[in-house]
Image: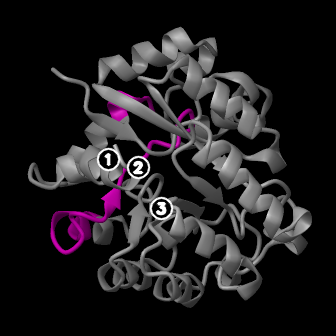
Amino acid sequence: MEKRIIDFRNRPPFGDFLKGDMYNGYALEYNAHWGDAPSKPLLEKTMESMLEEMDADDVRYGVAASRPWAGVSNESVCEMAEQYPDRFIALAAINGENPFVKGIDDAIAVVDKFILNGPCKGLCLEPGFVPDVKYSWRPDDERVYPLYEYCQKNHVMINYTWGNIGAKNFIELYKPEYIDRVAADFPDLVMVLNHAGWPYVIEHLGIAIARENVYLGVDDVLMPTMPGYELFVTATNRALKEKMIWGSCFPRGPGLKENVQAIRDMGVSEEAFPYLMWLNAEKVLGL
């Protein structure tokens, strides 16, 4: 069978990823808490085992984003994409915890260097998910608008980490009206919201229906352990079939095979499955 699936949130055992918490205790502790057996790549920490895992369940591409504030540099994910161009896609990220630490001109320079003139396929922004809450920021802060204008003009997709309880003050930081304003002000700017704005589930489903440029990355919210997952299943099967994008959060959680099987077990229809698992990702990545 031809490998088709695109894993939109993957952290392979490569370069700077190996230095972080994920491969040094955090993923093992997380998996133990939820009763998930650790995958072979998590234990062996090799790209060979990662590719074996992907091949076993027809995963064509893994999408991996840099996170400079957490030690995963743009240079490292570019090296990954250049060494494995047929298997991994890189997303760049701004320098500093928010766009104001280094300035908007520096953020635009990142887009120029790593996306427009490099191998990356989009820009990752994390308004709430930063080590210190004092560096959190609102995506509708008009000081960021020149960056959005530049990305819209140059057809650069923006992938937000947007939702979930990993951020401090997450109820305040992920209010749906913040991201909706950006989507309305920049209607030609393609935006993917990883974590799908959870716990504001209904609100973000509504935004994705109303805004043609907004897609929802259901990486760790479309799973039976998450309250509200049934709403994501219904949306995937019906109103938002062409707007939902799957990601595994690898190496956190079960192996890829178990992860994909869980999608089927939760009731994602055969008609919606290709859209969720690769067609929508292909569209936003320009593949």
Numbered label attached to residue 285: 2
| Secondary structure category for the residue under label 2 | helix
Query: On the image, numbered disc 1 is attached to which residue?
Result: 282
CA distance for labels 1 and 3: 15 Å
Which image quadrant for residue 81?
A: top right
Query: On the image, numbered disc 3 is attached to which residue?
Result: 155
Magenta-span inclusion, residue 167: no
- From which residue to which does the magenta span run? 233-258
In the rendered structure, which amino acid carries the disc numbered 1? Glu
Q: Earlier in the sequence, mark 3 or mark 2?
A: 3
Query: 31 or 116, which lies in front?
Result: 116
In the rendered structure, which amino acid carries the disc numbered 3? His
Crowd around label 2: few <14 · some 14–19 · many ≥20 (10 Å): some
In the rendered structure, which amino acid carries the disc numbered 2? Leu
Q: Position of residue 172 (x, y in %)?
A: 69, 84
Which image quadrant for residue 138?
A: bottom right
Colouring rule applied to residues: one colour
Q: Position of residue 71 (x, y in %)?
A: 82, 39
Viewer can see residue 130: no
CA distance for labels 1 and 2: 5 Å
Which secondary structure type mostly characterizes the magenta part of the structure?
loop
